[in-house]
Image: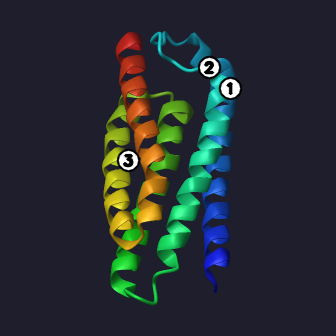
């Protein structure tokens, strides 16, 4: 499999995960989320879909670039991709905890684990391919913001 095919495979995988996360959130965004007290810095709802779409594409490109290095250092690349898969699963789980279970506290605990896995994935990707590392920075920053937002929503609605 060539580099482009690997990148496209992971981008599509990330977008599919994002799509299923969106299914979990859709009804709660209309019914439950508007009833919550939110901090003044809460973004408008319309911003989340384009931001997440862009982040999923960037994540996929990053993972594809790393995967394309598997012939040069198989064990290091495999380990990095395991961390990638774990953070992607945790990303999906957060949507279920926050919107599916409507539990900002549990989602708040989980997003800390998600952030740690994203950071670890970033550090592993950066050692393998600098561009892959750079592509993970916006994701890390967005989840940092989401962590603060999640904590504030929990605090305001406890």
Applied colour scheme:
rainbow
Side of 12 relative to 143 (left or right): right
Residue 135 against residue 141 in the figure, above or below: below
Q: Earlier in the sequence, mark 2 or mark 3?
A: 2
- The nearer-to-camera label among 2 and 3 is 2
Residue 152 against residue 69 in the figure, above or below: above
Q: Give 73 or 101, whichever is nearer the viewer.
A: 73
- Residue 45 on image: x %, y %: 64, 23
- Residue 5 on image: x %, y %: 67, 77
- Toward which corner of the image does residue 31 lie, by quadrant? top right
- Residue 56 on image: x %, y %: 59, 52
Which residue shows up at 37% across the image and 60% down it?
121
Could you tell me how far apart the alpha carbons at marks 3 and 1 are, in whole angstroms? 23 Å
Which residue shows up at 67% across the image and 38% down it?
50
Question: Quick check: marks 1 and 2 in contact, CB under 8 Å?
Answer: yes
For residue 114, which numbered disc appears in the image?
Answer: 3
* Residue indicated by mark 2: 44
For residue 46, which numbered disc appears in the image?
Answer: 1
- Toward which corner of the image does residue 141 lie, by quadrant? top left
Could you tell me how far apart the alpha carbons at marks 2 and 3 are, in whole angstroms? 23 Å
Q: Earlier in the sequence, mark 3 or mark 1?
A: 1
Q: Neighbour class for label 2 at 10 Å: few (<14), some, many (≥20)?
A: few
Tell me the element at label 1. helix
Residue 119 against residue 12 in the figure, above or below: above
Residue 27 against residue 34 in the figure, above or below: below
Tell me the element at label 3. helix
Q: Neighbour class for label 1 at 10 Å: few (<14), some, many (≥20)?
A: few
């Amino acid at each position: 499999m060539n580099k482009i095919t690997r990148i496209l495979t992971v981008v599509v995988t990330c977008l599919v995960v994002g799509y299923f996360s969106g299914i979990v959130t859709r009804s709660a965004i209309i019914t439950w989320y508007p009833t919550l007290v939110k901090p003044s810095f809460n973004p408008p709802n319309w911003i989340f879909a384009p931001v997440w779409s862009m982040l999923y594409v960037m994540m996929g490109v990053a993972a594809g670039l790393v995967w394309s290095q598997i012939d040069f250092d198989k064990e290091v690349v495999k380990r990095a991709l395991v961390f990638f898969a774990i953070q992607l699963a945790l990303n999906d789980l957060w949507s279920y905890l926050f919107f599916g279970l409507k539990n900002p506290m549990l989602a708040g605990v989980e997003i800390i684990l998600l952030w740690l896995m994203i950071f670890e994935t970033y550090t592993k990707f950066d050692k393998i391919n600098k561009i892959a590392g750079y592509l993970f920075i916006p994701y890390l920053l967005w989840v940092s913001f989401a962590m603060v937002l999640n904590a504030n929503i929990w605090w305001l609605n406890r």
